[in-house]
Amino acid sequence: MSTKILALVDALGNLVSFTLLPGQRHDIVGVEALIKNKEFNALLV
């Protein structure tokens, strides 16, 4: 069994938010919750 950690960080690499996903899930499943209601000047993927 594995777990994925998805993290949202600022330009300096400081943690803004994170979510945990089961290891067998695709990353896109957790991204919406991370970026919802956030304002971005730029988005690097």
Image (cartoon, grey):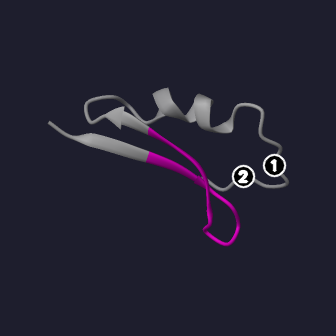
For residue 26, above or below residue 7: above
The vertical placement of 36 against 19, above or below, is above
Residue 10 falls left or right of residue 32 = right
| Residue range of the region highlighted in magenta in the rendering | 6-19
> Picture quarter containing residue 27?
top left
Is residue 12 shown in magenta?
yes
Q: Residue at x 67, y 72 (%)?
A: 12
Q: Position of residue 11 (x, y in %)?
A: 70, 67
> Foreground mark, 2 or 1?
1
Q: Position of residue 13 (x, y in %)?
A: 61, 68
What x and y, as percent, mark residue 24?
25, 30
Q: Residue 36 at x, y = what percent? A: 71, 31
Graded by Cα atoms within 10 Å as few (under 14), some (14 to 19) or many (20 or more), the crowding at tag 1 reads: few
Residue 34 sits inside the magenta stretch: no
Magenta stretch, main secondary structure class: strand
Q: Say which amino acid is labelled 2.
A: Leu
Residue drawn at the location 85% of the way across and 54% of the way down: 41
Quadrant holding the N terminus: top left
Please report contact status of discs 2 and 1: CB closer than 8 Å, yes or no: yes
The secondary element bearing badge 1 is classed as loop
**Vertical placement of residue 6 versus 35, above or below:** below
Between 15 and 44, which is closer to the camera in this rendering?
15
Q: Which residue is mark 2?
A: 43
Say which amino acid is labelled 1: Phe
Q: Quickly name the residue at label 1.
A: 40
Q: Is residue 38 left or right of residue 22?
A: right
Label 2 and label 1: CA atoms lie apart by: 6 Å
| Residue drawn where x is 40% and y is 38% of the image | 20
